[in-house]
Image (cartoon, rainbow, N blue to C red):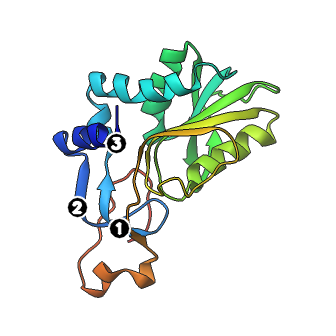
Amino acid sequence: MKNENILEIFKQTNALLSGHFLLTSGRHSNQYFQCAQVLQYPEHNEKICGMIANFFENYEIDIVISPAIGGIVVGQEVARQLGKKSIFAEREDKALTLRRGFQIEEGKRYLVCEDVVTTGGSVFEVMEIVRKNGGIVAGVGYIVDRSNNKVQFGVPQFSTLQLEVVSYQPEECPLCKQNIPAVKPGSRKVKL
């Protein structure tokens, strides 16, 4: 599938929102990708995550790991298609951590999967968890690259949709200057 095909799926499922949004990164934007609206449809989830699985099928990967919440569905589907185990990290006291008995296995190769990347903050946090615990980051796969390939993880990476979506530091946001209220549709609690 091409960018325009995936973008069309986002539009059909009302997953591409317009307005004034506070992103998980803390930046503001006039567009928001609500991947959950797309991934609720198994046929879209299978196709889109299949692109990630296909890209990494010839890489040595032992386990798929994702940041909660957005990355869990992506990681689970990619892992299913690759025939691998899937685990996730979740926020506790504002930091990603492993819970629920999940552990990094020393020397194993991990594919990090995420839904949307703007600055890559959550992905970098998961990569650090893997490395600190003796695992190897084999690659990063994600659905939407809001940076249009500007965020580089230093390992093989693949995104299904690359766009340069405008985002602003809060103090530079023209929507804030117009007194348009910002909304936070994502899962992470960030102050408005």
Q: Amino acid at mark 1?
A: Ser
Choose mark 3 or mark 1, whichever is in front. 3
Give the alpha-carbon distance from disc 3 to disc 1, as whole Å. 20 Å
Q: Amino acid at mark 3?
A: Asn
Q: Counting other residues with Cα less than 10 Å from the Cα at mark 3, is it few (<14), some (14-19), or many (20 or more)?
A: few
Q: Which residue is mark 2?
A: 18
Q: Counting other residues with Cα less than 10 Å from the Cα at mark 2, is it few (<14), some (14-19), or many (20 or more)?
A: few
Q: Which residue is mark 3?
A: 3
Q: Amino acid at mark 2?
A: Ser
Q: Quadrant of residue 20?
A: bottom left
Circle 3 SS class = helix
Q: Are marks 3 and 1 in contact (CB under 8 Å)?
A: no
Choose mark 2 or mark 3, whichever is in front. 3
Q: Is residue 140 above or below residue 184?
A: above
Q: Which residue is mark 1?
A: 29
Q: Does label 2 or label 3 sit earlier along the sequence?
A: 3
Residue 69 seen from this side: no
**Left or right: 38 with respect to 128?**
left
Residue nearest the observer in this picture, 154 or 77: 154
Q: Does label 1 or label 2 sit earlier along the sequence?
A: 2
**Which residue: 31% across, 47% down?**
34
Give the alpha-carbon distance from disc 1 to disc 2, as whole Å. 9 Å
Q: Quadrant of residue 57?
A: top right
